[in-house]
Amino acid sequence: MKKILVVDDHPLILKFMTNLLEKNGHQVLTAEDGLSALNILKNYVPDVMFVDLIMPNINGEKLCGIVNKIPKLKDTYIIVLSAIASEEIERKLDFAELGINACIAKGPLDKMGKNVLAALDQSDLNASSGFTGEVIGAEYIRPRQITKELLSNKRHYEAILESMNEGILEITADATIIRTNKSAISLTDMSEENLLASNFIELFNEIDREKVRKLLESNGTSLHSNERKSTVSLNSKKVELHLVPLKEEKTKTTLVVLNDVTEQKLIEEQTRHTKKMEAIGTLSGGIAHEFNNLLMGIQGNTSLMLLNTKSDDTRYNRLKNIENLIQSGSKLTGQLLGYAREGRYQISLIDLNKLVEDTSYIFAKVKKKIVINKELSTDLHLIEADRGQIEQVLLNFYVNAADAMPAGGKLTLTTTNVTHENMGDGPYTPRPGNYVMLVITDTGIGMDKKTRERIFDPFFTTKETGSGTGLGLASTYGIIKGHCGYINVESRKGKGTTFKIYLPASKAVVRDYETVVSEEQLLTKHETILLVDDEELIREVSREMLEVVGYNVLLAGSGKEAVTVYKKHQDTINLVVLDLIMPEMGGGQVYDRLKEINSGVKVLLSSGYGINGEATDIIERGCDGFIQKPFKIINLSQKIKKILNNN
């Protein structure tokens, strides 16, 4: 006696096979489709399976392929019982690959019965024999042309499914998967045999399961097309899920279309992040500008008082302390302006040591529990980079270190010159040449191997939901790569983290371009200066600063007034100190109008903003110089003299 499972969607065939096989002493179970068969096979191991190829809810081809991969069914003898067996062989269906041992063509019942019993006898003789390529009883099938046409339509449908980028799943009313294509297999990251007959809802995490369940429950109602869609997570991607109800005579199934929108969501998130950063940058720049104007008033008055205070006066040191505090405030606003420059890619020669000093200064003010140790090379090469972006890289590393040391700790910043031969500790082959290496080491909680491998992935974060975007180190990686540099990380759980950054070195040498000028050297030839600024406090203090060193000063409180005053006194005005940001008519418009009046006009731009952006544009149009607020008398005198002496 053999244990036999017959799988066929035709009740007449099931009844015929049951009577035939039981009459010959065999135990018989039947299944009306592939899905039912898989449920039976969970607890039943047949000696022989008869399988039809064309069935609903997982066809015979898929069923054989799944059975062939189940270890406990490896000795089951599979016999295909189908009217289309010959046609499937013609289209090169690999019966042996599917684990099929024999093939019988459906035909007249008396002939087919004899062939079935003969095939069972053959299974006794050689239970492990593979398919010979012969279809038993094929000569009795007459309407093969009709069968071919039907199969042609079926294969066309299958070909379309397999060529689609979208994942396609067909599920039953109880969410059991009965059909899938290659894209769906890829999206779910499951093998076909594990995916078929599994529960569709269980593919998702606990949060999304309820969403999918409700969507399926409402699928039978008259929903609009957009109401049958939802976006859910699947294997760190899913994706947009779209339901299409299918109604046939006997069954009601649903076609599920899965569209991977990971990249689309990434772009949308990056766009939102960019807009957010632009808005924050604009706000930061505006705050820095206004704060610099306030500092300008304090600095101007302090400079004037210092000119009239001897060094042995007790007030002198107090004034110097005020001036130092102003410079500290200026560094703070400089950081805000650096942040506001994000996105403007301007390459210049940069001393990385100075950038480390400036950025770590502000970080130390904010995170006082963290001790910063700097080991900076005295002969460090310059780099050619965008200052704002490298500043952002450093700030990202500082923030990352602070998160790793919530109770405080030590942050060590090291710079040194290296060559490509010294860079053998990363997963890359560096281009030959000289590099500047920056090492950032913290004494924080460190990372395990899994976290370390994903640290630069976009949107990967170890923080709680809502506490981080996961873009900080990802953008850092992009910036370093964009500068033809390299980055790698070393870390162990509980042992801190070390980042190493390598940036190509410039062939230029470090120079200090700022000339030191003593207060006694502030001599003028009594030239006339037109001072333009919409802030009255700044106009007055700047006027006093200019007059105290010997300049004649004309004032204008707006762009329109500046043009009017210049037209009237252009023959006596030697230079215009022009504020960049003013209402109605800004510095750029004023400059252009002044050039129309006198193409040889000398102009020194002044602003609480940095030189990047609009100031750079005006400089490129021929403006003679730029000075950032707050400035000392010495700095202002230097700038003016340099411009006038170049006359």
Image (cartoon, rainbow, N blue to C red):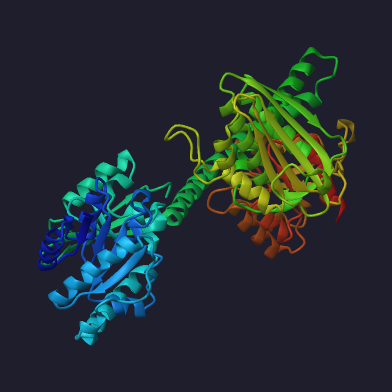
Q: Is residue 296 above or below residue 426?
A: above
Q: Is residue 382 left or right of residue 71?
A: right
Q: Position of residue 468 (x, y in %)?
A: 48, 36
Q: Is residue 233 above or below residue 490?
A: below
Q: Is residue 371 left or right of residue 53?
A: right
Q: Choose top left, top right, bottom left or bottom right for residue 466.
A: top left
Q: Choose top left, top right, bottom left or bottom right for residue 494.
A: top right
Q: Position of residue 40 (x, y in %)?
A: 22, 50
Q: Which residue sits at x=64%, y=29%? A: 363
Q: Is residue 347 left or right of residue 11?
A: right
Front-most of 404 and 54? 54
Front-most of 149 and 27? 27
Quadrant assignment for the N terminus: bottom left
Residue 62 seen from this side: no
Residue 167 seen from this side: yes
Q: Position of residue 160 (x, y in %)?
A: 34, 73
